Amino acid sequence: MKQGPQHWKLNQLCSAFLAAGLVLQICPAWAQTDTGIGSNGMSGADGAAGNPGSAGGNGNAGGSATAKAGFPVNNDTANSATATGGSGGNGGNGGAGNPPGSNGGKGGSGGNGGNATAQASTSISSYAEANVTANATGGNGGNGGLGGSASGEGGEGAGGNGGNGGTAVIGAVAESSGGYLVLDGTATGGNGGDSFGTGVAGSGGAVILGVSPNTALDGNALITAKVTGTANGGNGGNAQGAGIGGNGASVSLTDKVSGDTADILRLTQTAHGGNAGGSHGGVAGLAGSANSSLSRNTSSKSLQIYSNAQGGDGGYLLNAVSGVAGAGADATTTVNGINTAVGNNSDTDAGSNATGGHGGDSNNQRNGGAGGKAQNNTAAAGDSAHAGGEAIGGNGGDSYGGSGGSGGSASSVSSAVGTTDADANGYATGGNGGSNRAENGTGGVGGAASSSANAVATHNNSQISADTTAYGGHGGASYANGNGGNGGNGGTATTTTSAKGAGSGPLQVQTSAWGGDGGTGQGLGNKGGAGGTASAQASGTSTGNGDVAVTLDQRGGKGGWGYLGADGGVGGDSIADNLVSGSTGGALNLTQYAKGGDGGNVSSIIFALGVGIENHPAGQAGSGGQAKSVLNNVDDGTGMVTGKSSAEGGAGGLASAAGNGNGGNGGDANAEIALIHGGSVNASAVAIGGNGGDPIPVSPVTAVWRA
């Protein structure tokens, strides 16, 4: 709704009453909405029959769309702009060849999708909540036309190219000098059109956050400002014939959302790369990568800052005689939140999430695409600081007759520096390897996972914690009958975790690193994948007399099963040699646990519809992984020290239910502990050897403890 001078006076009056704690029925909530829709492009005309057939006409481009709400700047409390570009027209089909022996005509190209631009703004002084929204979606590209049919000995006409998706642009600014503010913007690129024959499919549309005069999504408020920006790259079109799939649009954002307030400031920025188009016999397109980097240095009661990114999925590849399916795209996030406000329970909460794209699937003995990598880096600083990051690698694509794609790696780094409190945590999971579902292929390797976290606080009574988790991706399976194939190895897992304090407050450090499980192998001469290894480190230090607890859990992955004559995979080893440490003038508790992965079982029986069918003798079951835990710590503190070092060998794999396979050996275990401390000490070491798979006996156990 357009406002005039009478509205401005009424708003001023309402602001005065609201500031005095009074609420009046006459206080309005003005709103302006603008919607722009581009017209769709016309399709190209079909070609006429002839010698050769005539080409189909090209589709027209979709119309552009523009929407503006709150321009010039007004004081509406809710302004919304939505723009949608028109779709491109499809290409016309090529004319048929006529008379006999004539070639068909070329199909026309699809038209490009229309661009879309949305802008919104407001500036209010009342206590009411201000809402500003800007959404733009690019038009989809048109599909290419079919090539004309041949007559007799003639050749079929070439298929047409797909049109590109339209670009989406958004921009928004808002100010609420008297109250709350919510600003939200989303830009989505149009999808590329499909192609036919040997044509090239259209690429996904680009996205842009920020349009002149709005250089970013920016919101300023007296009490609370919430600003959210999302950019979705367009997907590439598919090549329906032996052409080239369209590329997904990459997205890269750096500080495209911003805001300011003395109270609560919440900023969220998200980037999604577009998926790649697949191909039926040609080449898959490229997936769009995603990068989101967001930083803010402010003085607010609460700073909440989040950055997210997801890579596009790789394109499929079907019925091709060469090449591999498309790889998933990488995702990277960075967030750095600094809040200089002191006291009044001020805090900083920083978070990031990165997810790699999945690899494309394939058949015809072509390999599946690799999963995309994921990487994040999260930092928080303030009176009370929390930093949390998560990274998830993309899964590898499946294959029918080739190798499954490898899982994408994942890396998460978190750091929190606080005055009163600090909390840092990191989570990383490697992508799973793709499976093979036809004869002679292998499973993909699981992706590696790495996570680190560091927390530091300086106040006399600070509460400090650091926590990390890393899971290696599972290896892909090979399910095919006949010759079958090997299972993929599980991915490795690595963590590094530390915390430091200066006062009497408690300090806690926890870390878990688990190697990924191996994939199933099948067929004589093959084997299940090996379990991934794990490596973790953890330390906690208090220069005051705060209680310190440090816990480490490190496990090797399980070996993959072996079916129909394949051997079971070996379990991953877990060697923890002085990976836990701590120091304080108060109570100290150290715990270190290492476990070897279980060996893979073997079986000659495949169950189909509940009926067991025995085809081959079972292979050798996998051995359990070894486990070793050695914990030595020297500390001159005077508080009570408790330490426990534990090791558990992995169990050997079990033999077939039919009784014709060999069980695997259990993994050895060794545990030691030696603590030197100025105060009282309570130390223990426990070692448990892994059970052997029937009929293998339990392996030896050694345990040594000193205090």
Image (cartoon, rainbow, N blue to C red):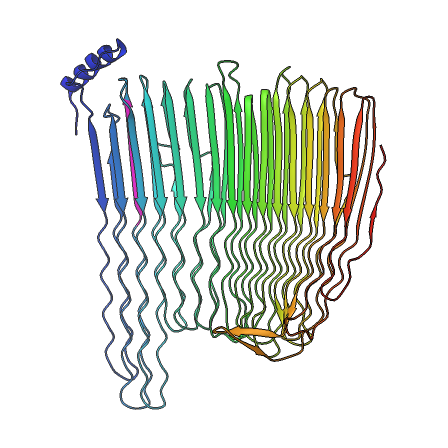
Residue 200 at x, y percent in the picture: 41, 66
Within the magenta stretch, is there residue 450?
no
Q: Nearer the viewer, residue 203 or 399?
A: 399
Residue at horizontal 26 percent and vertical 35 percent from the top: 80
Residue 314 at x, y percent in the picture: 49, 59
> On the image, which quarter does residue 391 sit in?
top right
Residue at horizontal 56 percent and vertical 59 percent from the top: 370
Q: What is the magenta segment's predominant secondary structure?
A: strand
On the picture, is 386 further left or further right than 499?
Answer: left
Residue 279 at x, y percent in the picture: 44, 68
The total number of labels drawn is 0
> Can residue 577 be seen by looking at this rendering?
no
Quarter of the image containing the N terminus?
top left
Per the rendered image, the range of residues in magenta is 115-123
Quarter of the image containing the C terminus?
top right
Q: Quick check: 378 above or below 440? A: above
On the picture, is 79 further left or further right than 597?
Answer: left
Q: Residue furthest top?
A: 20
Residue 590 at x, y percent in the picture: 73, 33
Q: Quick check: 147 above or below 12? A: below
Q: Quick check: 620 above or below 544? A: below
Q: Nearer the viewer, residue 102 or 8?
A: 8
Q: Quick check: 321 above or below 272? A: below
On the picture, is 30 further left or further right than 348?
Answer: left
Residue at horizontal 53 percent and vertical 59 percent from the top: 327
Residue at horizontal 32 percent and vertical 17 percent from the top: 177
> Can residue 529 be seen by looking at this rendering?
yes
